[in-house]
Image (cartoon, grey):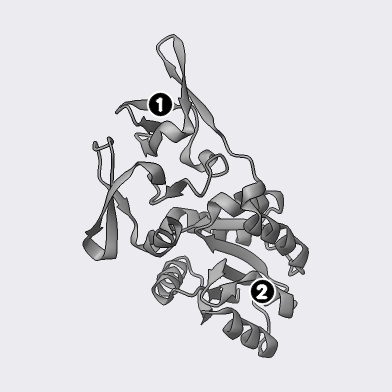
Amino acid sequence: MKTIIIEDEKPSARRLARLLSNLGVEVSEMLHSVEEAVAWFSGNPHPDLIFLDIQLSDGLSFEIFDTVEVKSAIIFTTAFDEYALQAFKLNSIDYLLKPIDDEELEAAVNKYRSFKPEKQNMTLNFDDIKNLLVNPLEREYKKRFTARVGQHLKIINADEVESFYSENKGTYAATSDGRNYLLDTTLENLETDLEPQTFFRVSRKFYININHIKDIVSYTNSRLQIKLNHFNEQEIIVSRERVKDFKLWLE
């Protein structure tokens, strides 16, 4: 199985290659930009499988396929879950949310091995995903959530939520009045419900609301610590792989 990685952050590309090597998948090439990828595809046989980051240093990776007809199976590696998750599902395209989890990577590789899809032109699918990426404001997002409190249902407005977080297999909403409510959902299901200009997934455990950030502090290993107005039960750390996107989101 010939596999390549297209990822502009070289440390992330090397880490992914190491994880794949542990699964018996050898990466033959690592490309880091749209320009580099177009040149490589123009002069080399196309691989069986591509691990593809959406946002590259010189543009969206979809621009590669505007120039070159690529016939390969693709697994996306992306931090843009809030924009693209629906399109991935509609088009049956596999994806991995950064930072990449070992078990999720293994499941994606096993899925590819199981189906062994024949190479096919993916351009039409890319067009659908691009429409979601460039038109996120046309989407509808949830304004309210409900939580059961005893025999009652509590209505929680999205703008009152400082963070959504997971703990002991449960998903909670931490609100501005200092309370935590157990929700009947998961963080993964919230990906298409939350307005991306307001909520950002800083780690696998936390979504935070930009309007409730009290302070941002430098943390070890090039990470950031988020302090919210009221929630202080746990440390909220922006994972190193998401710091770059988090800073862009703040602007």
Q: Using the rendered view, name the quadrant where residue 68 is placed.
A: bottom right
**Residue 54: image x %, image y %?**
57, 66
Q: Which residue is most to the bottom? A: 43
Q: CA distance from mark 2 to mark 1?
A: 42 Å
| Quarter of the rendering occupied by the N terminus | bottom right
Left or right: residue 220 versus residue 47 is: left
**Residue 179: image x %, image y %?**
32, 26
Q: Using the rendered view, name the quadrant where residue 122 is placed.
A: bottom right
**Residue 168: image x %, image y %?**
34, 34
Amino acid type at image mark 1:
Leu
| Above or below: residue 172 compared with residue 102 | above
Closest to the observer: 21 or 16?
16
Left or right: residue 187 versus residue 45 is: left
Closest to the observer: 89 or 172?
172
Residue tagged by mark 1? 182
Q: Residue at x 71, y 63 (%)?
A: 126
Residue 234 visible, this angle: yes
Q: Which residue is most to the top? A: 151
Regarding mark 1 in the picture, which secondary structure is present there? strand
**Residue 20: image x %, image y %?**
47, 68
Amino acid type at image mark 2:
Glu
Residue 53 visible, this angle: no
Q: How many marks?
A: 2
Q: Residue at x 54, y 52 (%)?
A: 81
Residue tagged by mark 2? 63
Closest to the observer: 200 or 186?
200
Left or right: residue 144 versus residue 151 is: right
Q: Mark 2 or 1, which is nearer the eye?
A: 2
| Quarter of the rendering occupied by the C terminus | bottom left
Q: Residue at x 46, y 25 (%)?
A: 156
Q: Residue at x 43, y 49 (%)?
A: 201
Q: Earlier in the sequence, mark 2 or mark 1?
A: 2
